[in-house]
Amino acid sequence: MILDLERFQAQARPRWSNLESLLAALEGRPDRRLHPAEAEQLQDLYVRTAVDLNRVRHGALAPELMQYLERLVARAYSELYYAPPERSEIWKPRRWLRIFTAFPETFRRQARHFALAVLITLLGSTLGGLAVRYDPASVDVLLPADYLRNPVRRVHEEEQGKRRELHSAQTEAVFSAGLIKHNIEVALLAAALGVTFGIGTALLLFENGVLLGAVAVHYTRQGFGLFLTAWLLPHGAFEIPSILVAGQAGFYLARVLLRRREDRNMRQSMREWLVLIAGLAMMLVWAGVMEAFFSQHHAPVLPYWFKVAVGAAELALLTSYLLLVGRKETAAEARARVSWENK
Amino acid sequence: MIDSQPIGRPTTAEVTIVTPEGVLFRLPLAGPASRLYAMLLDAVIVLGTVNGIGLLVYWIFAKAPGFGVMVITLGEFAIWFAYGALLEGFWNGQTIGKRLFHLRVIDQTGLPLRIEQAWVRNLMRVFDALPFAYLVGGISVLSSPLMQRFGDRVAGTLVMRQTPVAAPGEDFWTRQKYNSLLDYPAIAMKLRRAATPELASLIQDALRRRNELAAYARREIYRDLASYVQSEISPFPDELLEMLSDEQYLINAAGVLFNDQRLSRVRI
């Protein structure tokens, strides 16, 4: 049937403009909530405009009119079916503080992926360590920077305080910001590389592990084990776990993408990934501050045992945070639910 | 729910969405070029904002410039990601750049995107920006039927073109009282049957944009269109053509193609 467009438009234009003004009103509303009467009206106009669209599509040659109606139907559809988030929820500071408990909870829920990240890093560092142990010449290939290759000179310089003049609080602040930014970028990349089905994440973790193992063995063999521990542990206690958490997020993303068809709740999955990233970013801020303001001070100023002790304390704190926080709350919630169900 | 197979022969990429009620509509998708321009504009805005804040920070930390640099470095980094995520999440899927270039991010089911999706697609930029100049993202957009970069694929989002569409006005040719082509109903019927939708919309566009065209361009376009219709589709007799300008010929042809129901009452 060919439409008489002129008559059709004259009849239908009032309801299209009604729908248009209703949509404009709804879209201008910050919370995008519908009143019952509006919902009814919207539903009615939506259905009738959709019918009009169908008639134009099959009964007339009017591409511009069709485009107009498609746009109108699309807008009405998104207003009808979109459940907006509670605005009040978003602006509650308590919800923002939730991240501090949500992070360890998510961490424990996705512990398998963390284990995989640890495994790959350990594999890399074993390989790096063995390479340096049995083939010291490989140091030149494995360690990129000169200061990593010559521990004797580096330790001497550091302890002499040759770079001490650089160690004003001002330069340390700049250094720390650069570290935080760089580390978060690398960690974010490791988490995003999950999109390569985790292969990129694995390579990045492995490379990181090789470097770590090589440096550790290289310094230890030359008798600077204590120096190295004191140098790396205060910030490494947060930095290395945060890279592992980034790997965890990457592997989690890979799993989510691979099983997308089965996984109905993409929104929840995205939230888990985001919580892991928010958590590791917080860890890296702390690591960057420690690395710039604390780790770079050596023996005469700060005794090594003190630095190692601080590092160990941090590690213990982080471990108990990741393993324990949020646990009590969930137990309490579970109790509350059970008692409520029993009533 | 999503079918990337277009209906008809679209000239640009689009997504076809079928709602739960079986209503079907298409949304035009944005190409890489307009998205790049929008992103560059956003970059300028972010850098401008950061530098503006930076001046203030330097003033506050005048005694400790190192801390000033620290605040600015971290602030810039955070703003870089938060700008896109928060604006897209709370401002209908648009950043300032996207709004100016008529782009909008939506969920791939045609609904508005959620704040989680906005964060995911913006954090995924670190991957899409590899190895330089968004090469990975660009290749992803060009090779994807839904024009998605990796961030969009992960977040399940689309970037659509939202060029303003004018409400249908009163078409001026419908006010024609007398359509001389209808004096030849058989030929007019032939025109109606043989004209492709593309030709019909070409004629419609040419007429609608009459006042946007320079006089010589209008003359040429109308002449070409009219002689095409005349020679390839439906030859009306010469004595009629002598009385009609090319423009009037096209107006009448459009009347035949789009509106006139008088034809259906004519027996052939």
Image (cartoon, coloured by chain):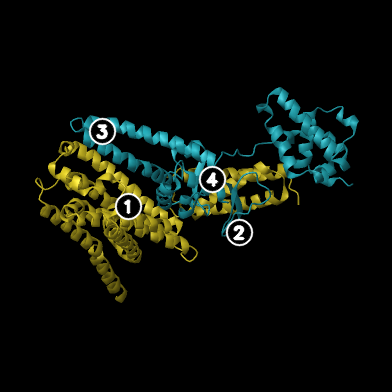
Q: Is there one chain holding both mark 4 and mark 3? A: yes
Q: Which residue is mark 4?
A: B160
Q: Which residue is mark 1?
A: A142
Q: Secondary structure at mark 2?
A: loop
Q: Amino acid at mark 3?
A: Val
From the image, state the color of chain B: cyan
Q: Alpha-carbon neighbours of circle 3 within 10 Å: few (<14), some, or many (≥20)? A: some
Q: Which residue is mark 2?
A: B22
Q: How far across and down, in percent of the image, does residue A151 sit?
A: 21, 49
Q: Which residue is mark 3?
A: B57
Q: How far across and down, in percent of the image, does residue A295 sit?
A: 18, 48
Q: Alpha-carbon neighbours of circle 2 within 10 Å: few (<14), some, or many (≥20)? A: few
Tell me, yes or no, if residue A70 can be seen here.
Answer: yes
Q: Alpha-carbon neighbours of circle 4 within 10 Å: few (<14), some, or many (≥20)? A: many
Q: CA distance from mark 2 to mark 4?
A: 21 Å
Q: Amino acid at mark 1?
A: Leu
